[in-house]
Image: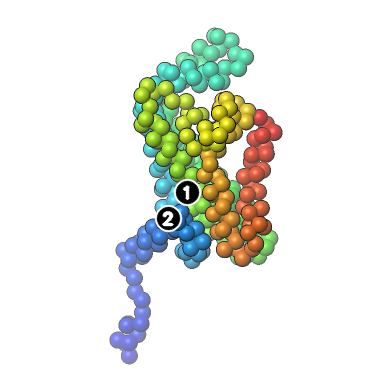
Amino acid sequence: MLALIIKNINIQSPKENIVSDSTSSLNILVNIFASPVNAYEDLQKNYPILLPLLLSIGISILSIALLYSNIDYKWLIDHMVELQAGDTSPAQQEQMRKGMGSMSPRTMGMLASASIIIMLFIIYSLYAAYLLMISNLNNDGIGFKKWFSFISWSFLPSLLGGVASIVTILSSNNGQIAPETLNPLSLNELFFSLDPSHGMGAILASTDISIFWILTIMTLGYAKWTQRAYFNSFLLVSAPLLAYYAIRILMA
């Protein structure tokens, strides 16, 4: 009897659990690009968070590290002062140069990396909280951690812009790389060629074409998880982004 019980118990060591979670994450990673519906089906059963966060943070930090190790730092300071100068006097602009010049490229890179990591967690958390609120209103029974995982995986196509930015940095001959034109997949670089320093140009420069991919797979995933129609799913998942861009356009 004891032998029969032991035979039917599925005992997994912590190491086996880690391997199983890693395999699941890798399967989801492949499917989020190749077969999103299957990815979200797996994600609904097992909602890992670590891999997409590591990828998003890793690509961001790598691109920033490469930027500040290859850029013409004096040129960058002059460029940033020119963008922020506005109606300031030459004396004030010189003060701005001294302030920026007091920080090394490494310090600037570390500050930029920290800012991106903080903003990533804020954006993902706010998006997950929004979906949790909708879920509670509709009694879907999906918790915050699942929605946070949903958002973390859904935004992975944005890594293509990070990889494209890295290629731009490594392809530069003189190190004079404007951060606002760094991503060749931005809507501004691809289609509009507006001044990226202000107005609609700045909005388009900070938005790359992967946003349409992200909204598409989020719609598929939300419909899969909640059994809602695709159109309704699209309206719900796109609402925060549409609100964000509406506010930016009004403020431009």
Q: Nearer the viewer, residue 34 or 7?
A: 34
Instruction: Characterize the local packing of mark 1: few (<14), some (14-19) or many (20 or more) Cα atoms within 10 angstroms.
Output: some
Residue 74: where, in percent of width, then height? 42, 17
Question: Which residue type does callout 2 highlight?
Answer: Leu
**Residue occupying the point 62% across, 52% down:** 237
Extreme-bottom residue of the structure: 1
Residue 73: where, in percent of width, then height? 40, 21
Circles 2 and 1: CB distance less than 8 Å?
yes
**Quadrant of the frame with the C terminus:** top right
| Residue bearing mark 2 | 29
Q: Nearer the viewer, residue 124 or 215?
A: 215
Alpha carbons under labels 2 and 1: distance apart = 9 Å
Q: Please indicate whether residue 75 sits to the left or right of residue 150 in the image.
A: left
Label tally = 2
Extreme-left residue of the structure: 3
Q: Secondary structure at mark 2?
A: helix
Above or below, 236 against 196 in this view is below
| Residue bearing mark 1 | 156
Residue 14 in view (yes/no) = no
Residue 159 in view (yes/no) = yes
**Residue occupying the point 53% across, 17% down:** 82
**Quadrant of the frame with the N terminus:** bottom left
Above or below, 201 against 162 in this view is above
Q: Earlier in the sequence, mark 2 or mark 1?
A: 2
Residue 7: where, in percent of width, then height? 32, 83
**Residue occupying the point 58% across, 27% down:** 194
Question: Which residue type does callout 1 highlight?
Answer: Leu
Q: Secondary structure at mark 1?
A: helix
Above or below, 191 against 76 in this view is below
* Location of residue 221 by image quarter: bottom right
Above or below, 124 against 166 in this view is below
